[in-house]
Image (tube, grey):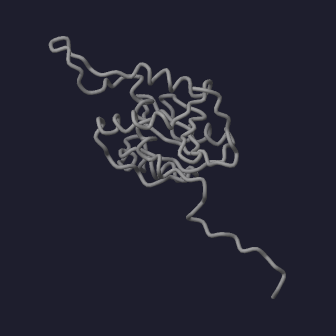
Amino acid sequence: MRPVPYDAMLKVHTIWDLGFNDRMSIIFVQRLLNQLMVIDFLEDQYRKYDWYVTEIKAKRFNLGRAYLPHDAGHDSPLLAATPEKTLKALGLDVAPVLPREDVEVGIKRTRQMFPRIYFDDEKAKPLVDHLKRYRRVIPSTTNEPQSPLHDEHSHAADALRYLCMCAEQLRNDEKDKPLPIPKTGIV
């Protein structure tokens, strides 16, 4: 953790863990070479997607793509469309939905990625606090750690796991868009 200032020359990608009754966790990250710079974090609950998109756009970042977990392609009981389609309709550049992955594999990948991740000591502090409290279920009968506990801290940890899952996809160029052709004045 250290000060990680926003660099307007780099894209700010958002990594989402979806929730409504549970918490919605959104990580704001910039990629510089091989480093992942977590510059901000947004979390709330009982809010609709348009509220989150308004909050994101109010930050006035050089927005990149929104990365969503596997369940974003599924129908939502609250919406007529999937979360993926809803966020696209609200003006976000949404990357293809991340595939479903075994949680244990994702936890191992995240542990390996920690040396590459820098967290802003102020804006990402709530995320780091959640990560400190992320834990496993330990039954009193066996005292053996089992799967991660689903609680108020697991959503932020899941968002970080999704970040590590898509880290190599984060780009600062707009590869899909054609290069502008300069006007030379010659006919």
Report whether 88 appears left or right of 113.
right
Left or right: where 146 falls relative to 68: left
Compared to residue 98, the image places residue 119 above or below, namely above
x, y percent for residue 46:
48, 29
Q: Of 68 and 90, which appears nearest the observer?
A: 68
Q: Nearer the viewer, residue 144 or 25?
A: 144
Q: Is residue 134 above or below residue 77?
A: above
> From the viewer's perspective, is 143 left or right of 24?
left
Quarter of the figure with residue 133: top left
Q: Position of residue 53 (x, y in %)?
A: 58, 42
Which residue shows up at 69% across the image and 49% down it? 9
Q: Residue furthest bottom?
A: 187
Residue at the image position 56 percent from the left and 64 percent from the top: 176
Which x, y percent locates residue 17? 43, 37
The image quadrant of residue 154 is: top left
Looking at the image, the residue that sits furthest to the left is 141
Which of the two residues, 116 or 86, is positioned nearer the viewer here? Answer: 116
Residue found at x 28% / y 40%: 102
**Quarter the N terminus occupies:** top right
Q: Quadrant of the C terminus?
A: bottom right
Residue at x 41% of width, y 28% of height: 22
Residue 146 in which image quadrant: top left
